[in-house]
Image (spheres, rainbow, N blue to C red):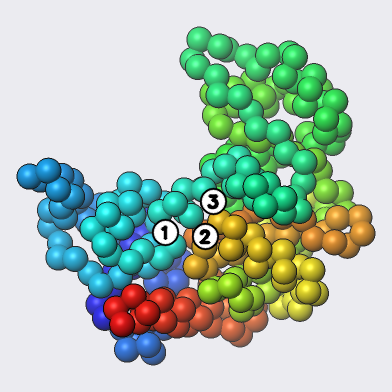
Amino acid sequence: MDGWLIYNQGMQTEKFQTIHHRYIEAAKGESMTLLPLSNAEITIGIKDNRHTLLNQKKPSFVLFLDKDIQLAMQLEAMHIPVFNSSAAIAVCDDKGLMHHTLATSALNQPDTIIAPLLFQHQLTMPQAFIDRVIKQLSFPLVMKKSFGSFGYDVHLIEDREQLLALSNEWVHIPHIYQQYIEASHGRDVRIHVVGGAVVASVLRQSTNDFRANVTNGGVMHRYEPNDAFKQLAIAAADRLGLDFCGVDLLFNEDNQPTICEVNSNAHIENVSRATGIDVAACIMNHIKRRIDVKYD
Ligand SMILES: Nc1ncnc2c1ncn2[C@@H]1O[C@H](COP(=O)(O)OP(=O)(O)O)[C@@H](O)[C@H]1O
Ligand SMILES: [Mg+2]
């Protein structure tokens, strides 16, 4: 079984190479090989009316750690098993679409409002919309870019002035407005789900920020979530059609879980170090089993 590990051309740092190395070693453990390739090293197109790869032979499967949806779609169209699927990655990439999809199964999540799509000639967010956001969510509330990560584009908004300023700055950028889950200030639970089972969990905490993301100066520790947290994480992964993911859960005031976000391309390095659990091995083992079923 010769597979590809596809990553984004812009992600060639040592940090990513360490993660790729973990996957490559895990694949070996399953008697498979993984060839790391950036998305720019594979040229897709259409030739003689059919999907084609211009410079590569077809692999037997792909571990897709990128967000280049069209590349993933084309590989799938060429009958190559892709993990995660293009559809699952696309939904998770867009926070608005992700919350929308979770709501189709009424999964527990903060109240969320999706910003309207406004064309270039509309220069400000309509006042009536702003008023509805305030009425529905009240202050403080959370604003997020739909396509952000590492907590960089997640803001706590205290008043109307801040709300107007950021809404107008983001008027042409997809974003969401969300109920602030105060009980979860500076902490969340990251649960890695692989093949419908919880394989590793950490509590992430920050002492200086409402965002618990490690990249904002927080810490993470191994954590044993209760059944409610595990079940919600599994249900979210299942609803979004993910083979593997990192589900971020917040604590509401009753200490019940509510979904912050689901990461289709969750990083495994920090969680593996914090828990001693080889998440890459769990993922490659799951992929091996899925492919074995397919080729049986
Ligand atoms: N509605 C919310 N209420 C309270 N804290 C939140 C809320 N949404 C996000 N956070 C905090 O901000 C962090 C980053 O938010 P998240 O939606 O995961 O964005 P990103 O994709 O940038 O990681 C979360 O890990 C969590 O600690
Ligand atoms: Mg997050």
Instruction: Give the secondary structure at mark 2.
Output: loop
Q: Is mark 2 within 8 Å of ligand 1?
A: no
Residue 85 is situated, as x and y percent measured from the top left of the image, at 42, 59
Specify the farthest residue to the left: 48
277 shown above or below 82: below
The residue singled out by tag 2 in the image is 241
In the rendered structure, are the residues bearing label 2 and label 1 in contact, judged by CB atoms less than 8 Å apart?
yes
Q: Is mark 1 within 8 Å of ligand 1?
A: no
Of marks 3 and 1, the one in the foreground? 1
Specify the farthest residue to the right: 254
Q: Amino acid at mark 2?
A: Gly
* Mark 2 and mark 1: Cα distance apart in space: 8 Å
**Residue at screen point 57% across, 12% down:** 123
The residue singled out by tag 3 in the image is 92
Q: Quarter-wise, where is residue 129 in the image? A: top right
Q: From the viewer's side, name the closer residue of 201 and 91.
A: 91
